[in-house]
Image (cartoon, rainbow, N blue to C red):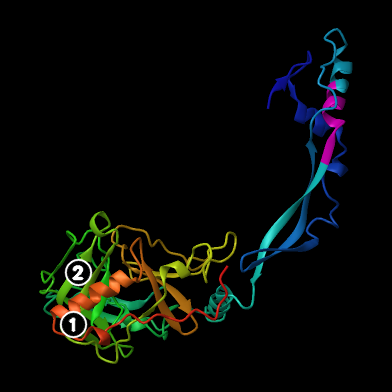
Amino acid sequence: MKRVCFGFPELTIAGLLIGSLDSSVAQAPNETRGAFAGWDTNAPAVYRLSLGQLQAVPEAPLSYKPPLLSLPPEIRSTLMTFRAAANLSFVTNTLRQFDHFLPESLNNVVWTNFIAHTNGRSMTIWSERTRPADWPARPAHVQWATNSLIWGMKGLTALCPCWQGEGPPGWGQITALTRRHGYARGHGMGPDRVGTDFGWAKAWFLTKENKMVEMRIARQVVRTPETSHRDYTIVLFDSDLPGSIEPMRVVRPDDVFVVHSKYPYVQDAPSLLFKTEQGGKVSADVPGFTVDTMKGGDSGSPNMLPLPGELVFWTGRTTSGASPEMQADMDELCRLQGLNPAKYQLRYFDLSAYPTY
């Protein structure tokens, strides 16, 4: 703001204005500040409005001609104050705070289910996950944390706690999306290709009874942003996952966190999403349940929509979600292995009952 000198210590117009106002005018009375002022909505979110601070806002001055320089400083000061203050508007700030989601929205289903099941819950997925000295000849020692945010949810066992191509523990995590297919990141996995060069690798899954299930990778397809404009690796196991390991269902990427979707991102409202990370924790991305999920090595870890009793795969961390192109790659791996692709299709969770915002 431009400073104006009056022959005594420099003052700003704003300073003069505030000094000329009675302090009782600049503040809303205590009995009204914080009072309920109505409701506001943004897509599925509903906000409670309350009265905040009363502020004087100068508008265009009534006169643009400054006082004569020959006038005494006190008179010039008064005239300049009048010039600024004679045309004021008083604005009461309105505070907006998230209150609830619309009852019919998917956001409401996810949020209310979460807050009903978080007491005593932890972000730790596995209470133990260590490699023996002769790993990978023997599998890692892994145990579920039964107070985890995701414990007991359908799709839980699709998380692969350990696989032979991960490098440091937890890097490049695999998630089972069918009984034959696992998902991981595409970038950092070599060139865009279909091949069998991962055929040496073992991958382990954990049943809810803490029994390790060892799988072998037979083939893989790698898709990279530079070549395919997609980012994922799909591995094909040499046998079906047993019934004790349950692949995750999926949702279309366009149904989550975009405008005109079933589950839009809403500013200043809980944007709940479960995200695993290499250290064996799961973040919910809400206060009290947040951990860093954007470290090197977290790419491809699943971003999951936590529906009542079920984890549903949305995308990988910084990587692509389910698509017709991904299903075509899965089908091709099946055909190369002599399998019927119809038996190994992505299973989409039906969100049609929820409105689009």
Taking depth in this image into account, of 146 and 338 the one nearest to the observer is 338
Quick check: can you spot residue 217? no
Is 319 situated left or right of 261 in this image?
left
**Residue found at the very far top of the displayed protein:** 70
Toward which corner of the image does residue 254 lie, by quadrant?
bottom left
Callout 1: SS = strand
Q: On the image, numbered disc 2 is attached to which residue?
A: 221
Q: Which mark is residue 34?
A: none
Type of residue at label 1? Met
Q: On the image, numbered disc 1 is attached to which residue?
A: 215
**Magenta stretch in the rendered image:** 80-89
Is 70 situated left or right of 284 in this image?
right
Location of residue 52 in the rendering, given as x and y in whole percent from the top left corner: 76, 53
Considering only vertical position in the picture, is 339 above or below 221? below
Please name the residue shown 44% across and 83% down the image: 310
Location of residue 80 in the rendering, given as x and y in whole percent from the top left corner: 83, 22
Please name the residue shown 32% across and 72% down the image: 324
Give the class, few, some or many, for how many residues have Cα within 10 Å of label 2's Cα (few <14, many ≥20): many
Type of residue at label 2? Val
Give the class, few, some or many, for how many residues have Cα within 10 Å of label 1's Cα (few <14, many ≥20): some
Location of residue 292 in the rendering, given as x and y in whole percent from the top left corner: 40, 61
Considering only vertical position in the picture, is 325 above or below 73? below
Tally of numbered discs: 2
Quick check: can you spot residue 37? yes
Please name the residue shown 85% across and 17% down the image: 76
Toward which corner of the image does residue 23 lie, by quadrant?
top right
Is 157 situated left or right of 11 in this image?
left
Callout 2: SS = strand
Is 284 situated left or right of 11 in this image?
left
Q: Looking at the magenta stretch, what is its main secondary structure?
A: helix
